[in-house]
């Protein structure tokens, strides 16, 4: 029996041939290609039901994709191939310009994902932040399904817990999730046999993450959170039934399975962990890393080119940092200033986590007062600033999780505050611009709400665009009334430096044989982040090769295109219209973004 993920080409072509035009089709639009886009969207929802929930598609709320299972990956390979065949039936003369752009994005997506499925290390369609996962290394300390799934369990994320059906859906979703853990252990054993195992340092960080799922008292268990906040409107019978069911699920299924996984990690996986740090040391690791660079940057840049670009950016930003340091009145050298910023009590003023959240909301008010000066577009969706959950806070970075597409569920800007008394504020203005407005919340909400885009382009997708835009957004601080404090401006430069360093250390670790310790030291020498934060970052890059380089590559391309438009158009240049052009077609591979902006520049020159 075929899995529910499969979508046959025959069905797609039938749908495409029968569809009627949409009433708002632009001139030259082809309804058949719109039907193919719709079919591709349904395929993407089916293969990634957690992302479907994230997008507000409730019919998938009780499903989980076992994305490392062989039959699942076979279905993906078949469908990506079939969609590419379907796209080949069209050329640019048969569709509208906007449809042609969407076709090119879809073709790029299908082609790169299909290539990933032929790689034994990589598996596609991970439910985690649209990143690929490692088939034979599926359990890691960050951006791994066991962490993301548990984030849903807290009843404050994208999984709804409003109705009795919602509560039953979550029980069924857990039942669908447990086979993933079984498959993960099978795949990790296969990885041991073939020499594809992560570094010991990463396995060591993963093991204690499971403690709370195994040992927490029932009433305090994360997966018991929905029962603690059960709506009063539920009937007594439903409350009793659900409470019993959740108790049995935690004590009879979930905790024992996590104990089995933890024992496996301790007794079998950790002893097999590698002493090396990078992907390049593993079988087929070098070719895999080259693929991941192409996937994450949407370019053909080599590891050497990215490494050299990173070093150049590090030197450029260091020179700008010297100016910011001078503005603070500090008289020591840059390394001394880094240490000053890391340890200065004036940059760690808080005693309660609520003060951190309140400060971000103050920044929000300041930014929103000036937003209209540089942006025309404005999303309907709002967002909340919230502390990261305790179970993942120690290893987490600040992040943004989009709200629902209909804007009924707000987005969430998560801020980790593991120790409020050492929480450093020096980069908070830049962090807000990156994660919230006009960064991730702004861009992703506009993308979700853009009715002219095919549905498959609504979710968060290409990291090089999404993260590149967010890093570009940090540079808009002075235009938005921020960075008056030289420490905050230095904080923006520090965040940019952090992304430039990634180009160096990511390629260093995975392509040039750098050790974890060498990468940590390079970061300590060139940025003001705390040592603990730098260690967590380096271990993140070890676990997600290539992903971290996307930020800087995307930012540099957007800045390059802005400078080109400013130089070409002179007085005709409008910053608001430039931002419209970047934002109004969703996440694009950089080659398509450049083609679009070049076309816009020519149209404005006439």
Image (cartoon, rainbow, N blue to C red):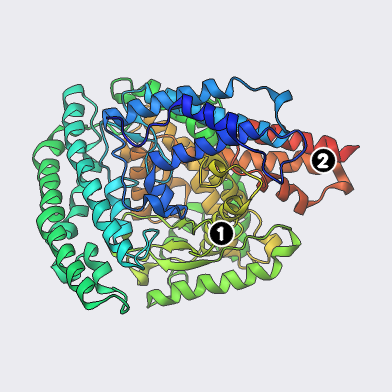
**Mark 2 vs mark 1, CA separation in Å:** 27 Å
Quadrant position of residue 274? top left
Q: Is residue 587 left or right of residue 6?
A: right
Q: Position of residue 43 (x, y in %)?
A: 45, 37
- The image shows residue 47, relative to residue 358, as above or below, that is above
Residue drawn at (16%, 58%) of the image: 249
- The image shows residue 486, relative to residue 30, as above or below, that is below
Quadrant position of residue 215? bottom left
Residue drawn at (69%, 34%) of the image: 594
Category of crowding for the residue at label 2, using alpha-carbon neighbours closer than 10 angstroms: few (below 14), some (14–19), many (at least 20): few
Per the image, label 2 sits on a secondary structure element best described as helix
Task: Tell me if I can see residue 392 in this picture.
Answer: no
Image quadrant holding the C terminus, namely top right
Q: Position of residue 528 (x, y in %)?
A: 46, 55
Evaluate if marks 2 and 1 touch, with contact meaning CB atoms under 8 Å apart: no
Q: Which residue is mark 1?
A: 430
Image quadrant holding the N terminus, namely top left
Residue drawn at (20%, 67%) of the image: 242
Total marks placed: 2
Q: Position of residue 598 (x, y in %)?
A: 76, 34
- The image shows residue 509, relative to residue 570, as above or below, that is above
Per the image, label 1 sits on a secondary structure element best described as helix
Frontmost residue, 104 versus 91: 91
* Of the image marks 2 and 1, the number of the one nearer the N terminus: 1
Q: Which residue is mark 2?
A: 567
Residue lying furthest right: 606
Q: Position of residue 506 (x, y in %)?
A: 42, 36
Task: Tell me if I can see residue 552 in this picture.
Answer: yes
Residue drawn at (22%, 53%) of the image: 209
Frontmost residue, 448 versus 132: 448
């Amino acid at each position: 029996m075929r899995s529910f993920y499969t979508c046959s080409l025959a069905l797609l072509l039938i749908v495409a041939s029968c569809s009627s035009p949409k009433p708002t089709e632009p001139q030259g639009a082809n309804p058949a290609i719109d039907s193919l886009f719709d079919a591709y969207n349904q395929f993407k929802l089916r293969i990634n039901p957690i992302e479907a929930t994230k997008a507000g598609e409730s019919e998938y709320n009780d499903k989980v994709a076992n994305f490392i299972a062989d039959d699942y990956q076979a279905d993906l390979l078949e469908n990506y191939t079939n969609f590419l065949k379907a796209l080949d039936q069209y050329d640019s003369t048969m569709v509208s310009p906007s449809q042609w752009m969407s076709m090119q994005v879809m073709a790029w997506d299908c082609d790169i994902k299909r290539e990933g499925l032929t790689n034994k290390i990589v598996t596609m369609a991970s439910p985690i932040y649209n990143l690929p996962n490692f088939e034979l290394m599926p359990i890691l300390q960050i951006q791994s399904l066991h962490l993301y799934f548990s984030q849903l369990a807290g009843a404050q994320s994208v999984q709804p817990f409003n109705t009795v059906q919602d509560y039953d859906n979550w029980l069924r979703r857990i039942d669908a999730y447990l086979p993933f853990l079984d498959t993960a252990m099978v795949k990790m054993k296969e990885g041991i046999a073939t020499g594809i195992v992560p570094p010991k340092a990463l396995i060591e960080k993963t093991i204690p993450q499971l403690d709370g799922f195994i040992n927490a008292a029932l009433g305090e268990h994360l997966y018991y959170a929905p029962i603690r906040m059960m709506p009063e409107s539920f009937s007594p019978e439903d409350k009793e039934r659900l409470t019993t069911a959740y108790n049995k699920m935690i004590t009879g299924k979930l905790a024992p399975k996590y104990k089995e996984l933890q024992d496996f990690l301790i007794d079998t996986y950790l002893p097999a962990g590698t002493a090396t740090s990078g992907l390049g040391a593993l079988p087929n690791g070098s070719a895999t890393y080259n693929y991941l660079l192409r996937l994450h940057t949407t370019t053909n840049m080599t590891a050497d080119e990215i490494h050299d670009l990173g070093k150049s950016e590090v030197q450029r930003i260091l020179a700008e940092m010297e100016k910011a340091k001078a503005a603070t009145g500090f008289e020591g050298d840059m390394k001394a200033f880094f240490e000053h910023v890391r340890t200065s009590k004036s940059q760690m003023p808080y005693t309660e986590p609520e003060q951190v959240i309140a400060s971000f909301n103050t920044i929000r008010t300041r930014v929103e007062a000036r937003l209209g000066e540089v942006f025309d577009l404005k999303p309907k969706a709002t967002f909340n600033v919230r502390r990261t959950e305790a179970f993942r806070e120690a290893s987490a970075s600040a992040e943004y999780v989009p709200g629902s597409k209909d804007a009924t569920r707000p987005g969430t800007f998560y801020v980790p505050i593991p120790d409020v008394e050492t929480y450093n504020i020096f980069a908070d203005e830049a962090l807000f611009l990156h994660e919230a407005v006009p960064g991730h919340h702004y861009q992703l909400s506009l993308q979700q709400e853009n009715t002219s885009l095919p549905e498959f382009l609504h979710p968060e997708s290409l990291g090089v665009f999404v993260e590149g835009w967010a890093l570009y957004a940090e540079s808009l601080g002075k235009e938005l009334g921020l960075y008056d404090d030289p420490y905050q401006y230095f904080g923006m430069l520090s965040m940019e430096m952090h992304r430039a360093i990634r180009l160096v250390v990511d390629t260093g670790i995975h392509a040039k044989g750098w050790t974890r310790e060498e990468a940590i030291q390079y970061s300590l020498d060139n940025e003001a982040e705390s040592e603990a934060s730098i260690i967590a970052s380096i271990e993140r890059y070890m676990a997600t090769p290539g992903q971290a380089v996307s930020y800087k590559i995307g930012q540099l391309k957007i800045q390059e295109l802005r400078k080109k438009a400013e130089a070409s158009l002179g007085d005709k240049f409008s910053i608001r219209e430039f931002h419209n052009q970047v934002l109004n077609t969703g996440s694009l591979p950089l080659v398509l973004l450049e083609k679009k902006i070049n076309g816009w520049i020519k149209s404005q020159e006439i």
